[in-house]
Image: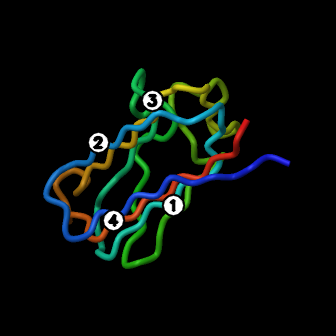
Amino acid sequence: MQRKFTHAFHIPGTLAADLNIRFTVPSGCTLVHVSFGNSAASDATIDIGTSVDTDGYLDGGDVGDSNVPAEFDKDDFNGALLSDAGREYPHLVDGTIMVVIVDFDGAGGTAAANLTIVLTFVEG
């Protein structure tokens, strides 16, 4: 059985700038789910990829509003690092630098507040 693990990020308060989150994955793994929400009616968006292509797995996902997170999974992964976008999960090899970019207000709209991002991976 494959083991699931998560990386969660919570940023309290109203964002005033974009986020640029980077971490190295601890082993070979597959990204299977993303939860992205905030407490406002925000226009924030998320890109997920690697240091090679920062939106290579998910390009421009909209935030969930008013404490109802948006969810992204296989059919939502639309980035250029995928060989069959929308039909495969992103697989990362050990040591890959994972990147999460949040545009805090989309294209100049309402800023996100009390933002939470949860990335769920399957080991292997």
Q: Separation of disc 2 and disc 3 at Cα?
A: 12 Å
Q: Residue at x 86, y 48 (%)?
A: 1
Q: On the image, numbered disc 1 is attached to which residue?
A: 35
Q: Position of residue 103 (x, y in %)?
A: 27, 49
Q: Which is more N-terminal, label 4 or label 2?
A: 2
Amino acid type, residue under disc 4 in the picture: Leu
Q: CA distance from mark 4 to mark 3?
A: 22 Å
In this figure, which residue is indicated by the disc labeled 4? 115
From the image, state whether disc 4 or disc 3 is nearer to you: 3
Q: How is the image coloured?
A: rainbow
Q: Position of residue 94 (x, y in %)?
A: 59, 27
- Secondary-structure class at tag 4: strand
Taking the image as shown, residue 19 lies to the left or right of residue 108, namely: right
Image quarter of residue 34: bottom right
Q: Residue furthest left?
A: 16
Contact, mark 1 vs mark 2 (Cβ under 8 Å): no
